[in-house]
Image (tube, rainbow, N blue to C red):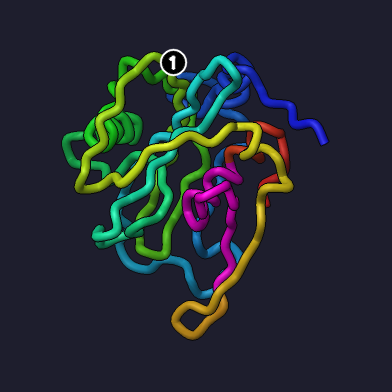
Amino acid sequence: MTIDVPTPEEIRATLAGAVPGIRRSATIGRVRGDHDGNPGMAPTGTLRLAAVLVPLVERPDGLSVLLTQRTAHLHDHAGQISFPGGRIEPDDPDAVAAALRETEEEIGLHRQHVDVVGRLDTYQTRTSYEVTPVVGLVKPPFELKPDPFEVADIFEVPLAFVLDPRNRERRSRVFQGAERHFWVLPYPDRYIWGATAGMLVNLAEVLAGETAS
């Protein structure tokens, strides 16, 4: 099975409209979340607004997705694989500004290296975050400086791996007495699951023109 990986120009065209002032893609717009396929797991109460950057790095051998591994002592999602990002603060003009600011603070990637081309579906987590995933193309060379309090590691996964449907699995486990279903992308020496995996599946579906699952 051959995986067609879109070019940066094709990605920009596909996501056109997911940023202000440009026509919105018809494949984007629903609210996803940890509650998908998990009745009763929808977040309740006030949702905390957050934004993450989905960085697509333009390497000579093809596009890759930059990800982080969170440190083990954090209160939320400790040790998990994630995108750089965090809460939208009152001083942030919008989700894009928050994603870029958080990325600079977490991994030292300056916004001058990021070309924001759109966004994915809003994602709600069981921990009551409502996350806006902002997609950006990143041109090397750039330097990274991870925040040692939040980031244990930074690594990249080929976009071709993410786009290959054979690399997506629906798994389950018992959580608080109930069976919970979630996406997993098993990458060598990494366990990408939960919200990050859900957003990567969303990215793959959008770029492939698939119907949302």
Q: Residue at x 22, y 34 (%)?
A: 105
Residue 108 sits in quarter: top left
For disc 1, the neighbor class at 10 Å (few under 14, some 14 to 19, many from 20) is some
Q: Residue at x 41, y 65 (%)?
A: 126
Where is residue 211 drawn, in percent x and y?
72, 44
Q: Is residue 41 left or right of residue 9?
A: left
Q: Residue at x 48, y 77 (%)?
A: 175
Between residue 211 and residue 22, name the one nearer to us: 211
- Is 189 located above or below residue 99 in the figure? below
- Quarter occupied by the N terminus: top right
Q: Is residue 103 left or right of residue 6?
A: left
- Is 115 located above or below residue 46 in the figure? above
Q: Residue at x 57, y 47 (%)?
A: 188
Residue most extreme to the left? 91
Find disc 1 in the rendering and name its residue.
139
Q: Amino acid at mark 1?
A: Lys
Where is residue 44 drawn, in percent x and y?
38, 68
Instruction: Tell me, yes or no, whether the highlighted magenta stretch contains residue 78.
Output: no
Where is residue 80 drawn, in percent x and y?
40, 55
**Label 1 SS:** loop
Q: Is residue 88 left or right of residue 194?
A: left
| Segment colored magenta | 180-202
Residue most extreme to the bottom? 177
Between residue 148 and residue 162, name the one nearer to us: 148
Answer yes or no: is residue 44 visible.
Answer: yes
